[in-house]
Amino acid sequence: MKKLLLLIVFFGLSSSIFSQWSTDPNVNNSVTTSSGNQQNVATCPDGAGGLIMAWVDVPTAKIYAQRINAFGQAQWPAGGINISGNTGDHSMPCICSDAGGGAIIGWRDTRNGSHDVYAQRVRVDGLLMWTAGGVRVSAVPYPNMTQLRCMGAEAGYAIFGWLNSANGLYSQKLDATGARLWNANDLRISFFSTNSFDMCKDAAKGVYFSYSMPDTTSDGWEEDIFAQHVTLGGDTLWDIHYCINHDTLTQYRPSMCEDQDYGFIVSWEDFRHDSHSDIYVQRVDSARNKYWGSHGKAICTTSDNQTRPYCISDAHSGAHIVWLDDRSQPAAGHGLYGQNVNHNGQSQWTNNGKRISYRVDGTVTADGRFNPQVAAVDALGGLIACWIGYSDDALTNYGLLAQRIDYYGNTMWSSNGVFVTTTDLVKGPSMVFDGGMSGCNIAWADGRSFGSSGYDIYAQHVKSGSDLGNRPAPNNNNVSKGSTVKQNYPNPFNPVTNISFDISSQGFVSLKIYDMTGREVAVLANGVYSPGQYAVTWDASNFATGAYLYKFITNEKTEIRTMMLVK
């Protein structure tokens, strides 16, 4: 009975849930509509096509969370769950998946008189797994914590990074029970005033950090880009303040992603040309070798300012770089441009970048990672970007817009983007890939009901074809003209599930299952198949509850889908 109830909570059995995602950008899905003020939403995928959101309830200074499933239905109590307890002021939420359908949420906390990092793990059904009010991540209070990030590690584990702007960058790792695993006094990554940083996974469950800070050796203490590699166990492998780029004047705001070859790719904002900022990028391996020249590769060097780069993996060992750009436009303001750089450092799209958006509203760009937002979209290496701004020369059509670009730089949706919402008061969009359907889920703070002093949280699913609404339901009665894999059935399952696939022409077929850390756990097909319909079974009796990926590869395509084991 308990298992049945959990399945009902997680996926829903009523047919009504299949019409839950709004199809109207004037309506959308409300997550909170109280008369308070909810802002600073952060999101992560739930592993089954939905999303988990964490936000600040401004009047109470507390962190709340909600999970929306793949069909747009809230899974936890109305208004969200109080994650952070009732002691102290709480802000700056960060969130990552726990690889089991739930999430690990961190925040800045003042309960001890200064700034600490606290965290809580929330299970797929909304049950809080750690100490009420959260566990303390940081060992000591910090006087001026300015940035906080987290990312998933092993199942149920999380790695946190934070800036204390006066004296450096710190990190800590929690296990699935909320216990600290690294240095008892926190792992110190940088030892001087540090103004910006980013982090990404390595291929061995460790983490890379990139950060900007003044170079004490020359340039009058201008900022440069530095990096550090930390192992699974919390050992730092590189020299303190290993320099990635040292050029004249300032380089800062690094953004990084894994390169799928044990290293990372990092982009940054660069002032070496003095009169304006440009975008540069570098690829570095685990042995600290720099592959794209000693000074990095120029991505965009037009005479206007290019700022706030956003770097994501393209699933082909390269990266997409997206940035705000002030080059000549129909009206003053920012455009959104992008470029793909392959594994060898070659730009794949238009020289100096392809324009993605028409006009980004610079007045809501307090955090460049909130406006715009970028998410990897599918196994073929495309991306989806969303931004707050306009879609026309007259600057009259305003709202939250999105655009999908394929791996080759082709615009997949309307040339000026599609409207996700048309409200005039929107802040801080946060976006995640929808888990296999080449669309995305987006959440944001919305002032449509109470004005600028009373934002609520709203969400929307955007399908792969740009329209809003429900994810396409799989139709197992129709045989695809091309090779394809179907959604497993049942899903969620315990412990056995079936996966069907169609083969259109003879050739090699691979069907493998991975856990959410990327570890291969089963091989269901790996050989030459003739045209036809096939079905295989996976018995997960020996595996833990959680989300899993299955990857289907043929000569025609690669498809990745998610499934959920619930015991």
Image (cartoon, rainbow, N blue to C red):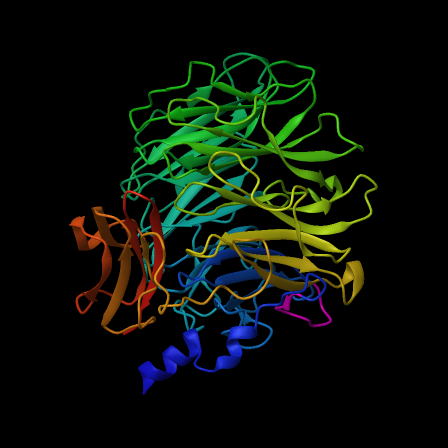
Residue at (81, 43) in percent of width and height = 395
Work out whether 319 lies above or below 138: above
Observer able to see residue 30: yes
Image location of residue 525, percent across then percent down? 18, 54
- The quadrant of the picture occupied by the N terminus is bottom left
Residue at (56, 74) in percent of width and height = 19
Q: Which corner quadrant of the image does residue 459 belong to?
A: bottom right
SS assignment for the magenta stretch, majority:
loop
Q: Is residue 31 magenta?
A: yes
Residue at (43, 53) in percent of width and height = 137
Residue 505 or residue 501, whichever sits in front? 505
Image location of residue 70, percent across then percent down? 48, 66
Work out whether 219 lies above or below 457: above
Q: Is residue 3 magenta?
A: no
Image location of residue 156, percent across then percent down? 34, 59
Image location of residue 418, percent across then percent down? 65, 50
Q: Tell whether 501 sits left or right of 326.
A: left
Q: Give the range drawn in magenta.
A: 28-37
